[in-house]
Amino acid sequence: MKKVLFLSSILTVLAQSFYSCKSEGGANPPLQTSFPLPNEIKEFMYFKPGTFWIYKDSATNMVDTVTVTDTVAIPITTNGKYYEQYQTITYSTHYKYYFYYSINTSWSEKCISGNQSRPCYNIKHIMTRPGSFIGENYLVFLPFQKNYWGYASMGIDNAIVRTTDIFDSVSFNPFVFSKVIQVNTSSNLFYGGAETNFYIARNVGLVRKEITPKQGNKIVWLLVDYKIVQ
């Protein structure tokens, strides 16, 4: 009889403890299964055909016209989870290469689910044309955090991409751009290992490109005209 009462007492204490914990902490949150791409990130990288940018080399007055040739927007459902993939494909008349800007939220699932404070998204930047694949870099990490850095490419050892500054507004004559990110790549695979500084504006894209080669003069591509279709 005593053994039964003793066991009953233990079970009662355990039940009360369990109830107390559940009441204070609440139920465990459900696992996240949907990973759409936030609009604040699309604003910096997703542009539709009809979009173009015209840049001029500040030293030589050479012109580079970059046009959006295609876009990709794909919802992906796999293993009960929802992801999104976005891609903007551009063509440069100066470099005569296609440049891809790609993002897939499945790359970010573990970071997002872990409630990380660091940026969880990255834009892959690919340079290619038929018969010639130059490679891929990370263009920038998002959401933006000043001084946050990561490795830029698998193609150059220790190359780093860093968000060096974030501006509410920047004036590059004759334009004024809002929400501009300055991104430095210590050794950019696309430009022979040159150091690059890119300025990326919300709803506009790349508005200024500074390329400092290991030898020779610095190249600055200034945006002189553009049209945006989002």
Image (cartoon, helix red, strand yellow):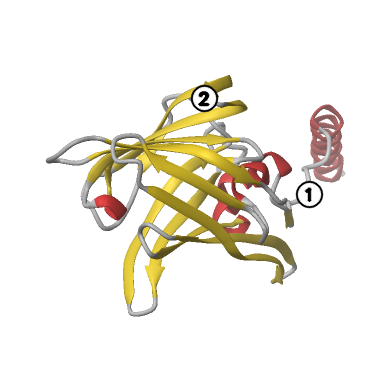
Query: Would you say 21 lies left or right of 134 here?
Result: right
Quickly name the residue at label 2: 173
Q: The disc labelled 2 sits on which kind of residue? A: Asn
Q: Residues within 10 Å of mark 2 (few under 14, many from 20)?
A: few
Q: Residue at x 86, y 41 (%)?
A: 8
Label 2, label 1: how many angstroms apart (C-alpha)? Answer: 50 Å
- Element on which disc 2 rests: loop
Of circles 2 and 1, which is in front? Answer: 2
**In the drawing, what numbered circle is on residue 140?**
none
Q: Residue furthest left?
A: 215
Q: Is residue 103 above or below residue 167?
A: below
**In the drawing, what numbered circle is on residue 30?**
1
Is the C-beta separation of discs 2 and 1 under 8 Å? no
Q: Is residue 57 above or below residue 177?
A: below
Q: Residue at x 62, y 55 (%)?
A: 105
Q: Residues within 10 Å of mark 1 (few under 14, many from 20)?
A: few
Q: Residue at x 51, y 30 (%)?
A: 181
195 or 18: nearer the viewer: 195
Q: Position of residue 139 (x, y in %)?
A: 44, 46
Q: Residue at x 69, y 61 (%)?
A: 83
- Element on which disc 1 rests: loop
Q: The disc labelled 1 sits on which kind of residue? A: Pro
Q: Position of residue 44 (x, y in %)?
A: 61, 42
Q: Residue furthest bottom?
A: 131
Q: In the rendered view of the protein, which quadrant contains the N terminus? A: top right
Q: Position of residue 152 (x, y in %)?
A: 35, 47
Q: Is residue 10 above or below residue 191?
A: above
Q: Earlier in the sequence, mark 2 or mark 1?
A: 1
